[in-house]
Amino acid sequence: QNLTVEPLEYCTDAPTAFQHPKKFQNIVGSLIELVDQLAKAVESEKMKAIGARNLLKSIAKQREAQEQQLQALIAEKKMQLERYRIEYETLCKIEADQNEFIDQFIFQK
């Protein structure tokens, strides 16, 4: 009995609420409605937080995938650069050989 009366001590209409069941029912109904609204608000905020967390995870995964793609592209470009360097060195050697051949041909005349 003490447990049911104690919460009602905080309500200013408690003494008259027991005398008027309708008034008591209205007070309880209002409290239930308030608790339901708070529960809905909490659930809504919870869903927003979950959505934000999932979005952040998604963004992190996208960045990680993009970083891997860029690393692969860098490796590919480094290999291409090395091929071009070797090709350039080969062409420089061919040019030097051809210039030497031309010089020898001119001096023979």
Image: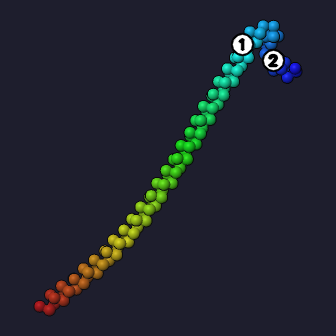
Task: Please provide percent x and percent y for residue 60.
Answer: 53, 50
Mark identifier at residue 64: none
Element type at mark 1: helix
Give the number of the mark in front: 2 or 1: 1
| Residue underneath mark 2 | 8
| Residue underneath mark 1 | 26
Report the side of 35 relative to 4 (left or right): left
Element type at mark 2: helix
Q: Residue at x 49, y 50 (%)?
A: 62
Frontmost residue, 77 versus 92: 77
Report the side of 89 relative to 65 (left or right): left
Q: In the rendered image of this protein, does residue 1 appear above or below residue 16?
A: below
Q: How is the image coloured?
A: rainbow
When asked about the image quadrant of residue 54, the answer is: top right
The residue lying furthest to the bottom in this view is: 108
Q: How far is the residue under mark 2 from the one under mark 1?
A: 14 Å
Q: Amino acid at mark 1?
A: Asn
Report the side of 1 relative to 53 (left or right): right
Q: Residue at x 83, y 20 (%)?
A: 4
Q: In the rendered image of this protein, does residue 21 appear above or below residue 105?
A: above
Mark before the other along the chain sequence, 2 or 1: 2
